[in-house]
Image (cartoon, helix red, strand yellow):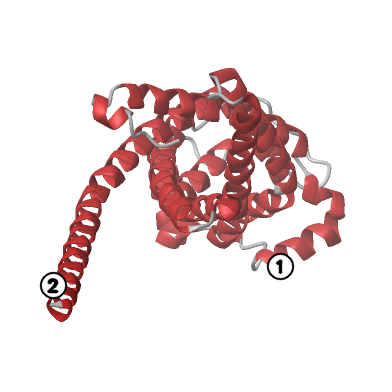
Amino acid sequence: MNINFSLTYVSNWKMQNLQLETKKLFASVSMGEEKPFDFFRILFEGVIAGGTAGVVVETALYPIDTIKTRLQAVRGGGKINFKGLYSGLAGNLAGVLPASALFVGVYEPTKQKLLQIFPENLSAAAHLTAGAIGGFAASLVRVPTEVVKQRLQTGQYASAPDAVRLIASKEGFKGLYAGYGSFLLRDLPFDAIQFCIYEQLRIGYKAAARRDLNDPENAIIGAFAGAITGAITTPLDVIKTRLMVQGSANQYKGIFDCVQTIVREEGPPALLKGIGPRVMWIGIGGSIFFGVLESTKRMLAQRRPVHDQNSKED
């Protein structure tokens, strides 16, 4: 009788475990089926928020960016032309909109996924990695846009369509990606550092304040993150500008040759040309960009169905 009881107990225990494992299996499958919906929602909201923020900040600060570009492009004691500070804006916005949308659209779901994978104390690594991945994706649109914009800003062409046509005819398709290596050298660290500083400051501030941040607070944190990152990456920006605006003259053979030539002919301080306008531009730009970004994300979150709002991600 004891043997029968033991067998019955073991059998029941096995059945319960089997049912539990089956439930776990179905729970896992169910979660896996819900993730694509979340992914596309985060992607869509990131695209809308990123595109909106990118267009607003580019339009507001384009003249400062033009002055910065002309400061970096001029050699020796050349004079700066302050006319036509909005030259090339329309064509630039045509590239900024998809580039910003693509960056945030890639960054947001990548960040959310990495935060699930990485331990909580490595959230900074998740933000750094997501920023670099987003920057690489956006570079496919950013680089041709930047090449055309800077050629227009330095007065080489009269309009964006002319710039694209003439660059392609004189330098080939690769001319639209002039300075691509230096662009990645500047923008991947820039994107990674800026978004990491911003996200980490937000996390710390929210923990201290024990509440969500408002738009002015997001803007102030964004300004600080942008200004610090802009200052650090100024030498990389100078190199990128020189390589992009040289055209078919091929004055510089590459990144290292560009650095050596600048230092030899103009001295090391030339690598910090335009740091004032750049820090001001990116600091103010960070304030506007992150303020608009978070405001747009919050507005989109409020328009979700009620059951999605209850599970919204930061």
Rendering coords of residue 137 (x, y %): 42, 54
- Packing grade of label 2 (10 A; few <14, some 14-19, many >=20) is few
Locate residue 314: give its quadrant: top left
Against 303, is 150 above or below?
below
Q: Distance between the residues labelled 2 and 1?
A: 78 Å
Residue drawn where x is 53% and y is 58% of the image: 178
User: Residue 122, how many percent across, how many down?
Assistant: 59, 55
According to the image, label 2 marks what residue?
A: 8
Residue kind at label 1, given as amino acid type: Phe
**The residue positioned farthest toward the bottom in the image shown:** 3
Residue at left offset 22%, top offset 66%: 17
Of residues 59 and 46, the one drawn nearer to the viewer in this rendering: 46
Quarter of the image where the N terminus is located:
bottom left
Can you tell which quarter of the image residue 210 is in? top right
Q: Name the residue under label 1.
A: 256
In the orientation shown, which residue stands out farthest toward the front?
Answer: 1
State which mark lies toward you, 2 or 1: 2
Q: Is residue 286 above or below residue 264?
A: above
Label 1 crowd (10 A; few <14 / some 14-19 / many >=20): few
